[in-house]
């Protein structure tokens, strides 16, 4: 009888002790979940900042590219006038002017390709930003209770 009483007492003690440990486990799991959510939010913010900096750099490069294209166009107009004989070419001969013209055209084509690459990068950044917002919306909707869904 004593053993049975001790056994039942110890089992009831274990049950009593297990209840606080369950709440302790739940608290620990909740803390772990909150920590994970906080870390996720920090990562999202860091990614957004990286995209922002990259977008600003792309914008700056596009502006510089536009200035270079304008300068090339002005030089091209002057060179074209000299080739047509409308402007004084000075000491330049026609072969030298044609050589400069072709170099100008090659430089302009190179700048146009670079501009296309920058625009693709900008579009990629926009798509990444859109994806990030969609993922955030999905996370918010997944966090809603099953009854509310």
Image: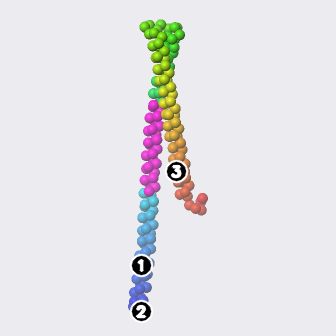
How far separated are the C-alphas under marks 2 and 1?
Answer: 20 Å
Q: Could you say where residue 68 lies in the image, as x and y percent from the top left?
A: 46, 24
Mark sitting on residue 14: 1
Q: Quadrant of the C terminus?
A: bottom right
**Residue 111 vs residue 65, the one in the foreground:** 111
Magenta-highlighted residues:
36-61
The residue that disc 3 covers is 136
Residue 16 against residue 35 in the figure, above or below? below
Dot 2: within a 10 Å radius of its alpha carbon, few (fewer than 14), some, or many (20 or more) residues?
few
Contact flag, marks 2 and 3 (Cβ < 8 Å): no
Q: Could you say where residue 86 lies in the image, as x and y percent from the top left?
A: 52, 8
Dot 1: within a 10 Å radius of its alpha carbon, few (fewer than 14), some, or many (20 or more) residues?
few
Contact flag, marks 3 and 1 (Cβ < 8 Å): no
Q: Quadrant of residue 14?
A: bottom left
Q: Considering the numbered disc 3 on the image, is that residue within a helix, a strand or a loop?
A: helix
The residue that disc 2 covers is 1
């Amino acid at each position: 009888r004593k053993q049975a009483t001790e056994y039942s007492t110890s089992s009831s003690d274990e049950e009593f002790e297990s209840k606080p440990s369950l709440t302790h486990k739940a608290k620990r799991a909740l803390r772990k979940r909150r920590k994970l959510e906080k870390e996720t939010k920090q990562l999202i913010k860091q990614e957004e900042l990286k995209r922002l900096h990259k977008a600003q750099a792309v914008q700056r490069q596009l502006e510089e590219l536009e200035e270079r294209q304008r300068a090339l166009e002005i030089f091209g107009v002057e060179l074209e006038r000299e080739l047509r004989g409308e402007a004084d070419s000075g000491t330049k001969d026609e072969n030298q002017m044609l050589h400069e013209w072709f170099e100008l055209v090659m430089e302009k084509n190179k700048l146009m390709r670079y501009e296309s690459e920058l625009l693709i990068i900008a579009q990629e950044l926009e798509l990444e930003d859109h994806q990030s917002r969609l993922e955030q919306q999905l996370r918010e909707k997944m966090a809603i209770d099953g009854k509310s869904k």
